[in-house]
Image (spheres, helix red, strand yellow):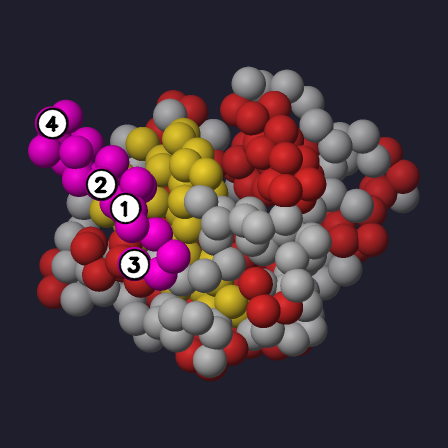
Amino acid sequence: MGFCFFNNVAVAARLLQTRLRLQRILIVDWDVHHGNGTQQMFYEDPRVLYVSLHRHDDGNFFPGTGAAGECGAGPGLGYTVNIPWPGHPPLADAEYLAAFRTIVMPIAKEYGPEIVLVSCGFDAAAGHPAPMGGYRVSAACFAHMTRDLMTLAGGRVVLSLEGGYDLAAMCDCAQECVRALLGEPGAAPAPDELRRPPAPHAQAALAAALAVHAPHWPALRRHAPLLALSALDAAAGVPDCDAADTAAAMATLSMHHPAALR
């Protein structure tokens, strides 16, 4: 739905179910618009975990769906995870990194997917005007999220290019994500973004999603204390976080930005 004639990722997921008999497929949708068609297709299907980060504006941003309370139904209850962002202030790396460390990755690890499909829209990238998103996510942040997802499913991650309307931004983001898929090092997000905690409105959106999904995903409870922290403060450690995860986060965030850890 939305701006698409065919939902590439949803069709791929269904084929993986029918032809390869996969039982745990993770779809991560970071296009700035909610994937209403993907959500509808798998809303009652626990074999697909659908996670969407999108601008929502309390339902006033196209397509208007994707509130935190839309979390699946029947046997699929808890397997639709919406992180509905506010429009203002313009969100950037700090908010997306917070979403990944507090919600996306904890749920994904608990789920244990056999493959990860990414609805890889770049319309949340810096360079898009407000009517098309207006966010400021960097190419380095998209690559960081890609590397996080590559720790799942034995590295079986597929990025499917979707939204994006600024050609320069799309080229930069695609290049960094492909570099991540190839296992090549890349730049870390800017030090200011690593030091900055999520904006208050974004923290509220994350808290709402946590409240909805904590009953379904116990792993979320121990990551809730990270919600209001900057990426660097979160990586520095919360006692009940996994030591290996903390070490990996510190290493990734410090790539090409040694000054960021001072």
Q: Amino acid at mark 4?
A: Arg
**Residue 216 visible to the viewer:** no
Range of residues picked out in magenta: 1-23
Disc 3 from disc 4: Cα separation:
24 Å
- Is 8 on the left-hand or right-hand side of 131? left
Which residue is label 4 attached to?
Answer: 19
Which residue is label 3 attached to?
Answer: 1
Give the image quarter of residue 13. Answer: top left
Please give the name of the residue rendered at 61% of the width and 24% of the height, measured from the top-left corner.
Answer: 179
Q: Give above or below for 254 relative to 85.
A: above
Disc 2 from disc 4: Cα separation:
12 Å
Q: Amino acid at mark 1?
A: Phe
Please give the name of the residue rendered at 44% of the width and 45% of the height, measured from the top-left corner.
Answer: 162
Disc 3 from disc 1: Cα separation:
8 Å
Q: If you read the primary sequence from the N terminus, does the residue marked by circle 3 or circle 2 appear first?
A: 3
Q: Label 2's element? A: helix
Label 2 Cα crowd, 10 Å radius (few <14 / some 14-19 / many 20+) = few
Q: If you read the primary sequence from the N terminus, does the residue marked by circle 4 or circle 1 appear first?
A: 1
Give the image quarter of residue 157. Answer: top left
Disc 3 from disc 2: Cα separation:
13 Å
Which residue is label 1 attached to?
Answer: 6
Disc 1 from disc 2: Cα separation:
8 Å
Q: Could you say which is closer to the camera, residue 21 or residue 60?
A: 60
Q: Label 4's element? A: helix
Give the image quarter of residue 37. Answer: bottom left
Q: Label 1's element? A: loop
- Is 99 on the left-hand or right-hand side of 231? left
Q: Label 3's element? A: loop
Label 3 Cα crowd, 10 Å radius (few <14 / some 14-19 / many 20+) = few
Q: Which mark is residue 11?
A: 2
Q: If you read the primary sequence from the N terminus, does the residue marked by circle 3 or circle 1 appear first?
A: 3
